[in-house]
Image (cartoon, helix red, strand yellow):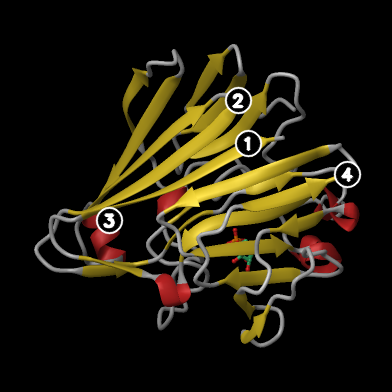
Amino acid sequence: MSLPTPLPTITLTNPDAESLVYLNGAHLARWHPTGQNDVLFMSAASNFAAGKAIRGGVPIIFPWFGAREGYPQSPAHGFARTMPWNVINCDKRPDGACALTLELVSSNLTRETWPYDFALRFTIAAEKTLTMTLTVTNTGAVPFRFEEALHTYLAIGDIRNASITGLAGVTYIDKVDGFKRKQQGPEPIVITGETDRVYLATQAECTVNDPVWGRKIVVAKENSDATVVWNPWIAKAKAMGDFGDDEWPGMVCVETCNVADHAVTLEPGKTHAMTARIEVR
Ligand code: TA6
């Protein structure tokens, strides 16, 4: 699928994969391992405009997740995904692949919304495996508490035939049932309706089993204590203007994050790094 590029973009190409990153939000929009279907879902109805969220790929969520408590006028999922990031470098790694690093630092604009000083760095190495690391540094003089997520949209053949393993027995917040806390059973997760769950106290690797496309997508992580699983299903898909009414069967979000009970408090001068590692088996 070719993506429109009205915004500044960077294409990463190596023998194992091709990827596309928008500087708007440091948004990895495409990761296409050689010989595979695209692994990241992208809505055909997505916006690609400065200051607007992109509906697919890997939105970077910071410094709050979902609605901002006490600030109804704040945009959902923070401001990092809609701001322009700067390219810091593209390091050739020992294995020959390129690791691209982008940065977003606090400014008068961000301080108007969130009164802290920070530096975010996002590093992507997109080859046979996709490795993404989001690093948060407190560059100010006071501690701050933040939520973060790599809100990864995975492309699958059909959600109605897919299942997700790795979260058996884990407690989750069910956002489509009054934010009640429930416990996941031992069986693989199957999606039969709008599903929006924040799994807590889990560092587990998750596997999306996709029999329609005959593949498994494995999402491993470091320094992340929560995982979100989301599919909008029929009604929510229709309600989203930047998401096709018929696109919900072709995607599932498995999000690597620190949110809710696992928001991070960072002391001045300290750094926190969260990594997601995705591969197709
Ligand atoms: O991560 C799942 C979620 O929080 C859902 O509740 C849904 O709102 C989704 O994110 C998309 O959020 P967005 O702000 O991009 O429309």
Cα–Cα span, label 4 and label 1: 16 Å
Q: Amino acid at mark 2?
A: Lys
Q: Earlier in the sequence, mark 2 or mark 3?
A: 3
| Percent position of residue 64, x then y | 42, 67
Marks 4,3: beta carbons within 8 A: no
Label located before the other in sequence (4 or 3): 3
Which residue is pictured at 63% across the width and 55% down the height? 254
Ligand 1 quadrant? bottom right
- Residue 130 located left or right of residue 244: left
According to the picture, the residue beneath numbered tag 3 turns out to be 109
Disc 1 marks which amino acid?
A: Glu
Disc 1 versus disc 3: distance between alpha carbons? 37 Å
Q: Which mark is residue 128?
A: 2
Residue 103 placement (x, y as % from top left): 31, 39
- Ligand 1 under 8 Å from disc 1 Cβ: no
Q: Is residue 136 visible?
A: yes
Q: Which structural element holds mark 4?
A: loop
**What's the CA distance linking mark 1 and mark 2?**
7 Å
Question: In this figure, which residue is indicated by the disc labeled 4?
Answer: 211
